[in-house]
Amino acid sequence: MQSCKDYPESLSYKYHLAYLLGEALSKADKIWYKGGYFTLNKKIKEAKHIYKLHQEYKAKLQELHLSYCFIPKEFLLDSLSFLKAIETLMHKLKSQENNSFKIESFFFKLFSQIPFSTQTPFLLKHKEEILQWLNSKEFKEQYINTNHPYPPLLNPDRLNAKRESKECNVESQRENRDSIQPYPNLSYESIPAELAWDLNLPLPRGYGFVWLSIHGCGAGATLRFFAECQIRINHRFTTNKETYLINYKNMVGGNDYCAIWTRAYRWENDKLYYLITHNVPLLCVVRDPISLLKPFVNHLDNRACCASVYRRINLTYDYETIMPSLIYSKGERPQVELLQRYSDGNHNLLGKKIALLRQNGLNDVRYLPFSSISLENGFNTFCTLARQLGFHSPLNREVFEVKANGNDRHVYFPFSLFLHDEDIKSMYQLGGMVCTSKDSLNDSKSIEIIVTLKNDRLFFDNQDYKNLTRKVFGNRNYQLPYEVALYVKSDININDELFEAFKVYMLGYMKTLEKKEIEELKLKLNERDILNYFKENDAIRKDYKKLFDEDYWHIKSHRPDIVESWKYYQEFERMCEEMDK
């Protein structure tokens, strides 16, 4: 029943006079043998009183343009009192201001955000603290005068004060006698993350920087780099609310270095960005905008690709079967026409999100060229950032020298190759007969080899597995945009004959994989294809010109040197200038 759309509204029937009177009669009847009916008159008066309170409560909600919210009887009187107190405050401020409409609209918006339905006990318990804050000079200056869309119901500075006072030494505390005093019984540590989100509380001041990620700018690599530097950060695909909850818990749950990951694409709403208020650096890796369009036009149909993947094979499987051709969003080949789909602006939100964060005080925007996180430069870049921002310097250079993505065949990894002596005689070899047998896949005597990518952190530096890659491939260099790695359980030994068969099979696999990659590379669309499409499709070109202008207004004024280094974007700009004359 609770999942029904009208369930909250249906609860209001508990406040109908007939229901309340029937409830009073029922209670009296249950204890008739104790003289329950002698208390019936009193219970009827209580029922009528509750009914009148509820009617007044409903009328107050309508006055404040609020939808109905069911409140249990024990909270009804205090909830009504709370609403009246905030309404009185609104009328007081309206009488003091010339623009009474602005005050009224602000408070109506505030009323709509008060989480009565989910947080009633907390709101009523701390009613005095909330009302004191809403009536303060600071609240008026910071939130009412600025018409803030998500005003907090408690003073963030006082919530931060307790945890920040612990970080200050005694001398600095004496110097700062006018510092904000913490709440006696409230702090970020005492407020659950879900409640903090409902109360519009800005995230605690416990993060060192904000990372603003652009689609196609090394997100997979940077997440791995953060892990190497022991930085606690949310995953890149979390929703705005999930991002808030994860980071809130990170910041109040320990002393680790924390940072916030936000995306410059996929618009939800602006609430998260208004709750990031700590003045810390805002970091963003940027890349030639025309190059950023390549993943869109070369986009795979991941679901179709994954459906054709073999996760369990043995030495009898032929390479063509376990290595199917890639399936793209529009069929067997990439399609430059996909640019039309991505011209809606949902992937070009960098300028909009920078503007949101800057209005909250995050003015220290630091752009990093895409080349700064390359295999050659990534380690040094993060060593420099560690010194500037105060997080742990990376120690393992190899983490930064392994490509994190940059290929489409990652959907086909990892898979398990099962080795069994019985498969040697029917092992598949290039140009040979195909005699596939599945028998060894479920044989307990089979040895499982994990075939994966070198950047797979599940096996990278995992003490439970030993790396056979060098032993099988030697010093061979394959023309692949990634490295394949081979692992086996540390306590497993492979006899010489079986290992030699395994080696021959994998060398044939890699030769076939290399050939497949070269064929697929010829199909890929590049920046030149994209520019030619813009040249031939004037409407789409103008759409992207507008998107780029909105996206890169800030970097153009703050880091023109980076923009000038974008070869294809500069060519696009010249094209637009000539064609729009």
Image (cartoon, rainbow, N blue to C red):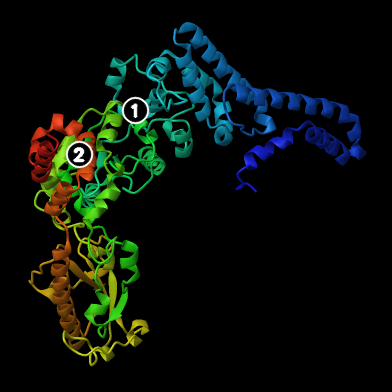
Q: Residue at x 15, y 69 (%)?
A: 519
Image spot of residue 376 (x, y percent): 8, 52
Residue 465 placement (x, y as % from top left): 25, 69
The residue pinned by badge 1 equals 164
Mark 2, other Cα within 10 Å: few <14 / some 14–19 / many ≥20: some
**Residue 542 picture location, percent across and down:** 21, 40
Image height of 387 relative to 219, above or below:
above
- Label 1 is placed on what type of residue? Glu
Residue named by callout 2 = 545
Q: Is residue 394 visible?
A: no
In screen coordinates, is 541 left or right of 310?
left
Residue closer to the observer: 423 or 336:
336
Q: Position of residue 471 (x, y in %)?
A: 13, 75
Determine the residue positioned at 10% across, 33% down: 560
Q: Quadrant of residue 123?
A: top right
In the orientation shown, which residue stands out farthest toward the bottom? Answer: 425
Foreground of the two, 278 or 7:
7
In which image quadrant can residue 24 be found?
top right
Q: Which residue occupies 33% across, 85% down?
A: 440
Looking at the rendered image, the disc whose residue lies closer to the viewer, 1 or 2, is 2
Q: Quadrant of the C terminus?
A: top left
Distance Cα–Cα, label 1 vs label 2: 46 Å
N-terminal of the pair, mark 1 or mark 2, is 1
Which residue is depicted at the point 67% across and 34% down?
A: 72
Query: Label 1 neighbourhood size at 10 Å, few (<14), some (14-19), many (20+)?
Result: some
Q: Which mark is residue 26?
A: none
As displayed, is residue 7 above or below residue 153? below
